[in-house]
Image: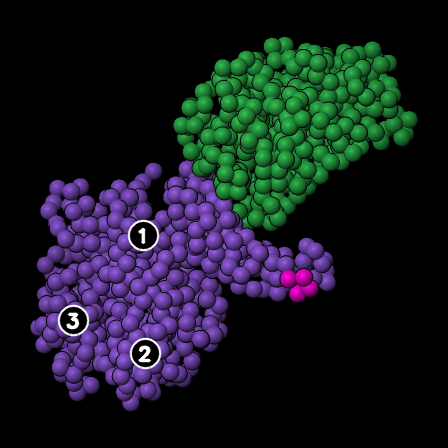
Chain colours: A green, B purple
Amino acid sequence: MKDKIAVIGVGHTEFGELWDSSWIDLVEEAGLGALEDASIKKKDIDKFFLGNMSLGMFGGQEHTASKVFSEVFSGGPDSHVLGRRIEGACSSGGLALEASFNDILAGIHHGQDKIIMAGGFEKMTDKPTDEATKILSAASDMGKEMGFTFPALYGIIKDRYIEETGAEEEDFDYIAVKSHKNASLNSRAQYSFEVSHSKVKDSFKVASPTKLLNSSGIADGAAAVIMTTVRKAEEIGTDYVVLEDVQGVNDSIALFEREDILTLVSTKRAADMVYRSTGFGPEDVDIAEVHDCFSIAEILALEDLGFYPKREGWKWIKKSLSGCEEMDGPIPYKLPGGKNLFVNTSGGLKAKGHPVGATGIAQVVEVVEQLSGRAGDRQVPDAKVGITHNVGGSGGTAVVSLLTKPDGVS
Amino acid sequence: MKRTGPEYRRTLGLRYLKGKRCKECGKIFLSSRNFCSECGRKGELTRIDLPKKGEVYSSSVVRKSTSDFNLDSKIPYSVGLIDLDGTDFKAPGIIDSESRTTGEEVQARIGLLGVSNEIRFYTYVWNRKHQYHSPEPSFGGCNVDGGVGIVDYGVYVPRKRIKSEEIAEVWGEQVEGLVKSFPGKWDDTGSYAMNSALNCLKGSGVDPSAIGKIMVGSESHPYAVKPTASVVAELLGSDRQCVDFEFACKAGTQAIIDAHDSVKAETIDYAMAIGADSSQARPGDALKYTSGDGAAAVLIGLKDPIAVINGYESFTTDTPDFLRGEAEEFPVHFGRFTGEPAYFKHIKIAAERLMESQCTKPGDYDYALFHQPNSKFPRKVGKRLGFTEDQIEPTVVVDWIGNTYSACVPLGLCRILDQASPGDRIFITSYGSGAGSDAFDMTVTEKIKEKQKQKKRSVDSWIGKEDRDLLEFESYGKYVKNKGLLKD
């Protein structure tokens, strides 16, 4: 147990069009928030990993870690921190988490209990929308999928899903209603208002069958978590949540190169690895923050993470969410075994916001807050096991993590 | 994000559906890679042409796009994965449709993806497949079988049409009964030339590397400097002589003369002559009712011609009836000057020279084709020269697509070849402002029957005389948008 990894602090900026904040302001706010939450000082940090998709294109800045060091850590004579930026499109945050996790594990082998900050950020609104869309399309196989936008890639997946399953377009629209309902309970959310099913249904067809209200927007934001060993956490005397495992897997970047465009093999494999190493299965999970950049992505995620049989997720979602407009949040999904699963209590990428590099870490922040009973209005009762699921591109990368409440199951 | 020459070259194969297949395991790739992803370095890859037909596996209609390649000016457009016929390979591509196409059969045609850094990136674009009207094979026989002539032909006309009433309404004029073609979303003169060339070469049995010369006549070449013909040649797989011609509406027939002479001189085996135009007209000009879009390609050779070129004559003067200045967007013309001292005089002299040198009279011909700036002129000049309605009518294309400038006479010629019987004699006179005319005398051979049988789509279908349900009649607004007259 002592050699397990603990998350001892979390920080999370507001997500949205934060015109008054630069990217470094956001990183500082999330980073300092996490440090305070962990009750440690800047100098206690050994390393930091920052997930970020495209500061180079969005902000014209490279050499990110040094800039973060200057502005956030600003050393002193005994400074020993080393940071780096990690890129994997929208899964950059998840990859930063994975890197931090394994760096701490490696430290254990050397008799060290490292304290690492895993962060993620994106500052997207400094660019006009069409340019931001172009930058985001760099997460797809730009050379081969010419003319394809991200909503179109997921539109193609959704179109095929509809073709093969008989699901109807409006079945997907309940997901957005649920996400907005959850986000209305989250003060950090970009879109913390409720939407009706008919409003989602009638929204602009960005890349049909993908509609505007099936899609996450463009946002600024940052999130950070402080991680160390359970031994160190107990030594510091701070509360913690256990990060049981994190696994990331790649798949081909281009949709057309996949056997089945309705399966994110990367998600499936990463989840299988996590379930195998931790001994937990989908049936043990109480809450999940999944990568719902588009409504169809949430269905595929729930199928690929093992909660629903393949190509049947839509039926369960429809069953769970019909009439959700009248329910109070957070709204759970019903699993085939009869259990409730709370998905994207934060509002998800859809409604909480999706500053791409920040998302993977922000998901962990939500799960940590839920497992430690600090989620306020959106608190899920008795949540003991949570997972996060962070996807890059249309599935070229997926990172899955599993977290537990320390004195819970196990 | 500006694209560059190296990227243009590197992505040619990808855009032209040239894939690679592993010699070991047969896996297909759509990239410039050198080794198989499964077999590694022992999996050597060979270049293959991917099928140009398939079924839409899944698709999405894009209504918000990026400034990359100005794609935001093309919305709505579709993208999707195409299950290529006879393979288990799905190709990503643009689909020329504003509505869902999943499950439909499609075929690939060349389109202009967009312009970046002034470089035009052409790519295959997928179009819905239809059953088309095809030419009726002719009967009979004749003893003409040798000589330099046309060995194959192909045309391309976009399916967009606008009626003169639509245009007249905007300009407060009354012009009724005219129809003309205009560009689809992915069209320009380059894509017209390329598609007509592909259609010409398709059933010819001619190895593209045997084409020693490709010429494109146009007055709307996509580049001021850089030949359209080189773009066509790369696509076809020919890498020898390439040159563009400009002589207003007769650049296409000048290309035919040049092709004939080169083959006759036995310096090359085959030459391709293309006339292609996306005709320019100042929005307020009377030309707005007639300037049309299209292309036709003829392959000239010595072996198995379907029509032998018996001879040609030309007539040229320095007459400024219609012209476009360097870097000017639109041509100007000088009203009544256009008819008498220009069109009628030049055609008359060239036509008479030809009949003199060939020792023929109008009655010796089965078809009489003249340049068609409008419906009236060709009929009028034909009658003045002594030709009859029966000889002229089967050659007319202007009534369905307008004046396609350099493509006009080549298109009319292809329409004749669709209908002609062995032994038929064809009389042609083109006209190009500036000014000049080329006149040709041709005789159709026995080989025409086989060629007509081979053609899956008639010129009548392309111009919209047949298959009228495939035409897309649009508003003036769509016309202005697709013609590039809309300024942001």
Residue A251 position, x and y percent, is: 66, 43
Which portion, as a residue range, is magenta?
Answer: B22-26
Position of B188 relative to B392 (above/below): above
Q: Earlier in the sequence, mark 3 or mark 2?
A: 3
Please give the name of the residue rendered at 19% of the width and 85% of the height, measured from the top-left corner. Answer: B357
| B245 on left or right of B45 | left
Identify residue for label 3.
Answer: B392
Q: Which chain carries label 3?
A: B
Write the residue at 41% across / 74% down.
B204
Q: Mark 1 lies on which chain?
A: B
Between circles 3 and 1, the one closer to the viewer is: 3
How far apart are the alpha carbons under marks 3 and 2?
20 Å
- Secondary structure state at the residue bearing disc 3: helix
Question: In which quadrant is the C terminus of chain A drawn?
Answer: top right
The residue beneath circle 2 is B448
Amino acid at the residue labelled 2: Ile
Of helix, strand and loop, which mostly describes the magenta segment? loop
Between A272 and B445, which is closer to the camera in this rendering?
Answer: A272
Q: Which amino acid does label 1 sit on?
A: Pro
Is disc 1 on the same chain as disc 2? yes
Residue A115 makes an appearance in the image: no
Three-letter amino acid code at disc 3? Answer: Ile
Q: Residue A208: horizontal and vertical position, in percent?
A: 44, 37
Within-10-Å neighbours for mark 3: few <14, some 14–19, many 20+: some
Image: B114 above or below B225: above
How many other residues sit within 10 Å of disc 2, few (<14), some (14-19) or many (≥20)? many
Mark toward the viewer: 3 or 2: 2
Residue B214 disc label: none
Q: Mark 1 points at which residue?
A: B183
